[in-house]
Image: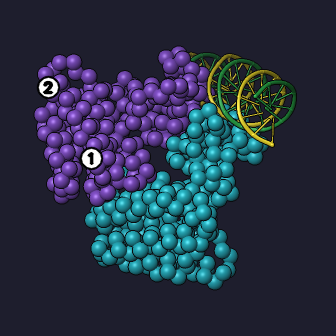
Chain colours: A cyan, B purple, C yellow, D green
Amino acid sequence: MLKATPPSASVGEMAYRRIRSDIIFGKLAPGQKLKLELLREAYETSVSTLRELLNRLASEGLVEAEGQKGFMVAPVSPENLREIAAMRLLLEGHALAQSFEAGDMEWEGRVVAAHHKLAQMERRMLDQDRADPELWKRYDWEFHHALISACGSRVLLETHAAIYDKYLRYQMVAVVFRGEIAAREHQILLDCALNRDMARAEQVLAAHIDGCVDDTLARSALEAC
Amino acid sequence: MLKATPPSASVGEMAYRRIRSDIIFGKLAPGQKLKLELLREAYETSVSTLRELLNRLASEGLVEAEGQKGFMVAPVSPENLREIAAMRLLLEGHALAQSFEAGDMEWEGRVVAAHHKLAQMERRMLDQDRADPELWKRYDWEFHHALISACGSRVLLETHAAIYDKYLRYQMVAVVFRGEIAAREHQILLDCALNRDMARAEQVLAAHIDGCVDDTLARSALEAC
DNA sequence: ATCTCATATATTATTGAAAATGCCTGTTGC
DNA sequence: GCAACAGGCATTTTCAATAATATATGAGAT
């Protein structure tokens, strides 16, 4: 997810990242039609290159591609959010359990480091000082990813990453900041990780995700979709 | 998965299905380099169109796309098979439980119908008479899909379908036919569904999948990868 | 007024060619 | 003999133009 830009990247790869990011962070609105000609100007690339990455995004589920009628940003709905949240919980919960089993010292280091960065950021966000949602969400991702990084399954990690990004889009369209609650839950998750307390971790993770879903649904006009 | 060809389909869509099928059924070998020019001739389409669907397949994980070096069929490995099998079990098990909860009469009908077709096919396979692995595997898919079709989550069903196809490729590269065992397990799964016996279903499903994995690993030269 | 059909416009899907990049080979210098 | 560099070939990546398809517009009939 949102990898920091690797040294060199092809034109298509750059455009892919930009469009993907613009969808996730709501600059391209859900349901919006994606006209090739307009995108070509906006992202400075040719239609063929565009079609390549739009197909990729369609396969990921961030855009829809009903045949012969072009592309549009994947629409959002409360049901879809709930399904994605449930999916995230299923994948992340399972990965968490396996990570707790297999995690070594190296893993603990990653978790502690990621939590430190996230916690600092959360403190800053609460001070209203320099709120940078994109960076904050990157740290949130890095923490959750670190927690499950010892699960031992690439397939699981990749599937989780794909779902996480879709989940993230919902959070961004209704810019939620459940600062204090989330921060406390992150703290608890860290403690659970270090003590390998899976039962409590699962519980907190469920509350963490469900809470965000409720918040997102409540604060946005999503119900009206 | 392997939808029966819809009435009209665009050139790209046709080529996509053919290549996808050729990968899953082993006509395009794992690790094989996919040269645009050769594919263009073989599938009678242009490079740009090809790149569109190769990008799609790359996003699905059936081909790899290391940047500036073209495409190749996704390689196989024992670890990857085990990860995919574990993933299938996680998704299918969860979906099964929810399906058992929510399944109505309509669902039971679908399950019974799908099982009937599959059972007939399995009988035919055992007679060595007209062995058609592609059709057999389609029915296998339809049965497993019917079982979880009442789970209530599109996201879950789509994610499961993607994983199932990758799993299927492993079965095809080492054409396994565990006829009698699989048939009996399918029968038990049907009974469990009608009786909503989730505990036993989970158990059988795990054995079903694990058994196939062991068989695939044992019968193929996959260990050497 | 509204519905239908034909025409025109806009948009997408597909193609083939040009530019960029990686890869192999053969040669030169040490 | 071996390593490194340069040139040429193979392949991929990107582009702009053509063909196919869908959407919008408007005239004529009911």
Question: On the picture, is A147 further left or further right than B103?
Answer: right
Q: Residue B108 carries which label?
A: 1
Question: On the picture, is A46 further left or further right than A21?
Answer: right
Q: How crowded is mark 2: few (under 14 residues within 10 Å), some or many (20 or more)?
A: some
Residue C23 picture location, percent across and down: 52, 27
Q: Answer with mark 1 or mark 2, whichever residue precedes in sequence.
A: 1
**Structural distance between the alpha carbons of marks 1 and 2:** 27 Å
Q: Quadrant of the N terminus of chain B?
A: top left
Q: Quadrant of residue A47?
A: top right
Q: Residue B126 carries which label?
A: 2
Secondary structure category for the residue under label 1: helix
Q: Which of C28 and B44 is in front in this view?
A: B44
Query: Which residue corresponds to the image point at 59% horizontal and 59% vertical from the top-left?
Result: A225
Query: Which residue corresponds to the image point at 31% horizontal and 26% vertical from the top-left?
Result: B134
Residue A170 picture location, percent across and down: 56, 62
Q: Nearer the viewer, mark 1 or mark 2?
A: 1
Secondary structure category for the residue under label 2: helix
Three-letter residue code for mark 2: Leu
